[in-house]
Image (cartoon, rainbow, N blue to C red):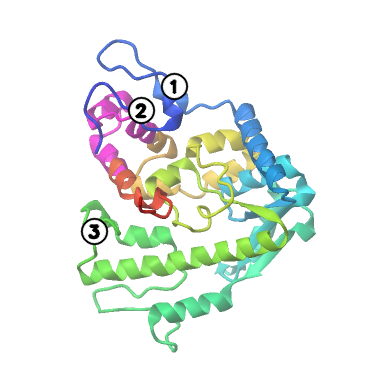
Amino acid sequence: MLKNNHQVHLINSDVKKGVMLLYHGEEKMNLDDKLRIDAPVIKSKIVAFIRSTLEKRDIDGLLVLYKYCVESITNVHLAIETVGRNNVKLVVTKGRFVKKQPREQMDLEAINRYLDLPEENIVFVNQEKILKEIRNVFSGRYDLTTGIAFSETLPVMNYNLSYYLLRGMARKEIEHKTFAAPLKKPSTQREKFFQRAIAHYKSQIRLRVLLAFLLAETENRSFLGSVNKTERLLGLFTKFGTYHAADFLPLASLYQTQVIQLANHLGLQEFLASKVAPHPSSYNYFFNLSAEEVDRILIRVESGLSVKQIAEDTGLSSEAIKNINYHYQSAAYARTVPLIPKL
């Protein structure tokens, strides 16, 4: 729950290093200022941290699992800064088609435009055969290949549906707090259906991690994951999935807006402009808020402010703040490492 006491408990480690918020007096730190970073300093810290760890472990290079997103592109640039472009491998999973254009061609165009890597360092991995077996497990029938339907009231699902679309279809349950697995066991047929469909999608995401680690470990490389802090706090990632299970999570301490600042410093303005314009962000899709508004709420939630205090501080609605806080609380399980009993 959001804390209501005026003496705010500083939860996040970054905030602990800052100034204590004092709402019982006139003095307070503007948390929006903490969302602005010194990008050159941040880049240097990330590069130094990764480089020092690689030297201790005698690792030769880095591997990034590619996705057309600012985090993935930023990680490639950070990797190049750390070990040099000849020691960075990019892994692109393929097998699907989008708008009748091969995904491989789309990815190659973006890679050639925004990344300067040797051609031999870019690897395309076809995961369709393994995905077929996952689909068989999911369906429970080896002759079912087009979709599933448990009753006429439930939608027929195509196996390539995205996690965002699945969560969007379950929005009613999420908003009414009747479906937030594993916080609450699904009870209705519809809720069980979404749980099964989302679990199936996550299995595909985790498969990519296996492929990435296979290549990394056979070539003495470390694998960089691409989750940012905003995604991590809100559960907009798959636990032990593509951008979570990794040797390094260079961007996991940076909110989405801070990653964008870092990307601008790395010279990715053209990519950011092409990425933002045609596609609304997942934050707009789920919360009807911009990434900036989500981050302004999240940094205050982490700092222990009440809904009322956040609303007064940001000018955003109480309902929006409660929605962000609910997802923040619901995603706590996803942010944890495997639980170990104290014996």
* Most foreground residue, 269 or 253: 253
Q: Quadrant of the N terminus?
A: top left
Give the residue at mark 1. 18
Q: Secondary structure at mark 3?
A: loop
Q: Earlier in the sequence, mark 3 or mark 2?
A: 2
Q: Give how far apart the Cα atoms at labels 2 and 1 are.
A: 9 Å
Per the rendered image, the range of residues in magenta is 296-324
Q: Quadrant of residue 70?
A: top right
Q: Position of residue 69 (x, y in %)?
A: 56, 50
Q: Give how far apart the Cα atoms at labels 3 and 1 are.
A: 36 Å
Give the residue at mark 3. 184
Q: Are marks 2 and 1 in contact (CB under 8 Å)?
A: yes
Is there any visible trace of residue 266 in the rendered image? Answer: no
Q: Position of residue 131 (x, y in %)?
A: 52, 75
Give the residue at mark 2. 10
Query: For the residue carrying disc 2, how many other residues have a C-alpha within 10 Å: few (<14), some (14-19), or many (20+)?
Result: many
Q: Residue at x 68, y 38 (%)?
A: 52
**Does 308 lie within the magenta span?**
yes
